[in-house]
Amino acid sequence: MSCFAYILPLIFVFILLFAWIKKVKIYDSFCHGALNGLTTVKTILPYLITVFIMTELFSVSGISTFVIKLLTPIFKLLKIPVEIAPIVILKPFSGSGSLAVLTDVFSTYGVDSYVARCACAVFGSSETTFYVSAVYFSKVKEKRLTHPIIISLVSTFISTVFACLICRFI
C-alpha cells in the first residue's frame, strides 16, 4: 500500500483535531453545512433539469445535425476538421455527450491522428456553457444570461480555431 492511501485519513484526523482544539461543535457544524447544501440543491435543481432536457431535445430533434451541416463550410474555411463538428456543437451543452463523441473519434481515426489531436484540444479548451450558466446564475439575482452565454460561445469558437491551428504544427 502506498503512502498516498494515508493522506486522506490524515487530513480527516487533522481537521477533527483542529476543530476539537478550537472547540467547534463538529456534529452541529456538519448538520448546518448539510442543510446549506440541500438549500443550494433546491435552488439549482430546476435550472439543471432544464439544461438536461434542452440538451436531450437538441440532440433528438435533429437540430444538432442541422447546425453541424450549417457550420461545415465555415469549418472547412477555417481548416477545422469537419469530423470534430459534433464535439464543437455538443460540448457547450453536454460534457459526457461530447466525451462519447471524442471516444468515437479515437476509435475511428486513431488517437495520434490530426483529427484526434484537434478533438482533444477542443474538448479540453471548452466548457459546458449552458450547464455552468445554470449553476452559477441560479444563485444570483441577475438573470439576463444572453451576453455571458454569447461571449462564452464566441470564446469557445475562437479557442477551437486556435486549438486546431496549433494542432497542425504539433
Image (spheres, grey):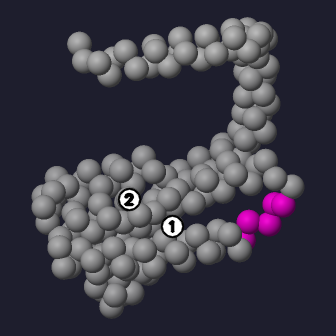
Q: Position of residue 109 (x, y in %)?
A: 14, 62
Residue for badge 1: 63
8 lies above or below 82: above
Q: Can you tell which quarter of the image residue 124 is in?
A: bottom left
- How crowded pointer 1 is (Cα within 10 Å; few <14, some 14-19, many 20+) is rated as few
The earlier-in-sequence mark between 1 and 2 is: 1
Rendered position, 49 above or below 117? above
Residue sitting farthest toward the bottom? 77
The residue drawn where x is 16% and y is 53% is 107
Q: Label 2: how many residues lie within 10 Å, few (<14), some (14-19) or many (20+)?
A: few
Q: Position of residue 130 (x, y in %)?
A: 61, 58
Secondary structure category for the residue under label 1:
helix
Instruction: Compare residues 16 and 156 and report the one nearer the observer.
Output: 16
Main SS type for the magenta part? loop
Which residue: 29% across, 81% down? 165
Q: Could you tell me the amino acid type at mark 1?
A: Ile
For the C terminus, the quadrant is bottom left
Residue 41 magenta-highlighted: no
Q: Residue at x 14, y 66 (%)?
A: 113
Q: Nearer the viewer, residue 125 or 67?
A: 125
Q: Is residue 85 above or below residue 40?
A: below
Instruction: Looking at the picture, tell me which residue is in the foreground, 153 or 124.
Output: 124
* Image-based side of 15 in relation to 71, left or right: right
Give the labeled residue for mark 2. 124
What residue is at 25 percent from the left and 18 percent from the top? Answer: 2
Quadrant where the N terminus sits is: top left
Identify the magenta region: 142-146
Quarter holding residue 39: top right
